[in-house]
Image: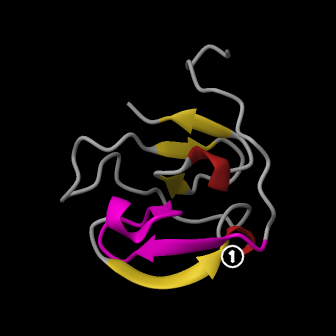
Amino acid sequence: MDENNTKKPFPIHKDTPAFFCIECGAVSLLASNICKPHGRGTKADWCGIKHAARPDKCHNHVNNLRYRCKKCGQASVTLELLCDPEKME
C-alpha cells in the first residue's frame, strides 16, 4: 500500500469499455456508478489525456469513492481505469 492507502490497480486492457459522466466528469466500468452516463468509450479514451480539474465528488453519488490519476488528473470511480490512481479525499 502506498501513502494514500490506494491499492495497486489490476491492469486492464486499453480497449476495456467504460461509461462517462457528463455531470461530474468521472468514468466507471458500470453506468450505475455515475450520475449521468453520457456515453461509452474505452480506457484508452480516458486515462492519459490531460484535462481540467474534476470535482472532488459526484453530485448525485456523494458517497462513491473516487480516484484521480496522478499523471493526467482524470477522475474515476473505478481505480483500474487509471494508470496511477490516488484516492480523492
Which segment is the magenta one?
15-33
Single out the residue that lies furthest toward the bottom.
39
User: Residue 76: x, y in percent?
Assistant: 50, 54
Judging depth in this view, the residue of 71 and 26 nearest the camera is: 26
Judging depth in this view, the residue of 56 and 39 nearest the camera is: 39
Residue at the image position 65 percent from the left and 48 percent from the top: 80
Residue at the image position 69 percent from the left and 67 percent from the top: 43
Which color scheme is applied?
A: secondary structure
Residue at the image position 21 percent from the left and 46 percent from the top: 62
Judging depth in this view, the residue of 89 and 50 nearest the camera is: 89
Query: Is 84 situated above or below 12?
Result: above
User: Residue 54: x, y in percent?
Assistant: 42, 57
**Amino acid tagged 1:** Asp
Kind of element beneath mark 1: helix
**To which residue does mark 1 refer?**
45
Query: Is 29 situated above or below 19?
Result: above
Q: Is residue 24 magenta?
A: yes
Instruction: Specify whether 44 is left or right of 41.
Output: right
Count residues near mark 1 (Cα–Cα under 10 Å), then give few for <14, some for 14-19, many for 20+.
some
Instruction: Specify whether 37 is left or right of 39.
Output: left
**What quarter of the picture does the C terminus occupy?**
top left
Q: Quadrant of residue 17?
A: bottom right
Query: Is 9 situated above or below 5?
Result: below
**What quarter of the picture does the N terminus occupy?**
top right
Q: Is residue 6 magenta?
A: no
Instruction: Specify whether 78 is left or right of 49.
Output: left
